[in-house]
Image (cartoon, rainbow, N blue to C red):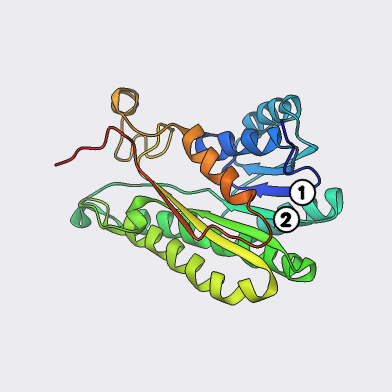
């Protein structure tokens, strides 16, 4: 392994499962220091062990709710205190509640906006000052194809994912002159715990031809290992099993 990220520190939200979990292991194999956050501490500790075995330079965990500003601050502070820098931020945490509009409650709306948009804002807001001081950094939003196209039964979810794409596009213009790269990865459906019980079923996901978390993790790795003179603005990902209809 080339260890392309040796000496670099990456903060990953929503790391206790799915795309966040797979991305942590992909970056660990390239020697990155990791700060991992999620709600389930036992899962974070399991991932810490696997990431260390995979070759991570160091692994720190912060259990908590990414919608809380103190958790965002704590994660960024941990990166600086333990590794002296924060080079990569992967805004991965998010939820999906798939319902027709007339069945979508205000609580559903608040939950999706807070998880998908507020958390992205909080972690980026607290990471960027350190990246400005370094005059370098990479920020990735894990959005969705639902952030590029509207899907029936997903109006509010799509709105939050469009928001992430717009946030990334605006920050690319704002931060690129300083040396900070900002991009967005937009996968289609992925075989994870995402939206189970709120629009998807375990059986449906298992039987689907959706992307694997590792597929998306490789796109994350690609965006994190670009040369200093290049950046990835947007990656769209769909399964090869996608219908041609």
* Rendered residue at 64%/58% (across/down): 138
Question: Closer to the camera, 215 or 119?
Answer: 215
Asked if residue 96 can be seen in this view, the reply is yes
With 68 as the anchor, is 193 left or right in this view?
left
Q: Position of residue 73 (x, y in %)?
A: 71, 59
* Rendered residue at 64%/33% (across/down): 25
In terms of secondary structure, where does tag 1 sit? Answer: loop
The quadrant of the rendering that contains the C terminus is top left
Tell me if label 2 and label 1 are in contact, CB under 8 Å: yes
Residue that numbered label 1 is attached to: 8
Q: Position of residue 225 (x, y in %)?
A: 65, 48
Q: Position of residue 91 (x, y in %)?
A: 56, 53
- Classify 10 Å Cα crowding around label 1: few (below 14), some (14-19), many (20 and above): many
- Classify 10 Å Cα crowding around label 2: few (below 14), some (14-19), many (20 and above): many
* Rendered residue at 68%/67% (across/down): 128
Residue that numbered label 2 is attached to: 87
* Rendered residue at 28%/32% (across/down): 241
Count of numbered tags: 2
Q: Disc 2 versus disc 1: distance between alpha carbons? A: 6 Å
């Amino acid at each position: 392994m080339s260890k392309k990220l040796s000496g670099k520190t990456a903060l990953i939200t929503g790391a206790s499962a799915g795309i966040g979990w797979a991305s942590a292991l992909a970056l660990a194999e390239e020697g990155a220091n990791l700060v991992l956050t999620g709600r389930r501490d036992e899962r974070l500790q399991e991932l810490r062990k696997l990431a260390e075995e995979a070759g991570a330079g160091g692994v720190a965990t912060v259990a908590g709710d990414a919608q809380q500003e103190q958790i965002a601050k704590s994660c960024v502070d941990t990166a600086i205190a333990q590794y002296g820098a924060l080079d990569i931020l992967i805004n991965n945490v998010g939820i999906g509640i798939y319902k027709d509009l007339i069945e979508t409650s205000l609580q559903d709306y608040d939950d999706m906006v807070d998880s998908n948009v507020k958390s992205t804002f909080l972690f980026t807001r607290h990471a960027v000052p350190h990246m400005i001081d370094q005059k370098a950094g990479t920020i990735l939003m894990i959005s969705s194809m639902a952030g590029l196209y509207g899907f029936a039964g997903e109006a509010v979810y799509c709105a939050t994912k469009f928001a992430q794409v717009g946030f990334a596009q605006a920050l690319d213009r704002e931060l690129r002159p300083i040396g900070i790269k900002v991009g967005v990865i937009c996968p289609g459906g992925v075989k994870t715990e995402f939206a189970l019980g709120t629009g998807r079923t375990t059986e449906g996901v298992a039987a689907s031809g959706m992307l694997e978390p590792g597929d998306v993790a490789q796109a994350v790795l690609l965006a994190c290992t670009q040369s200093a003179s290049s950046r990835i603005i947007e990656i769209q990902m769909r399964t090869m099993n996608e219908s041609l209809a």
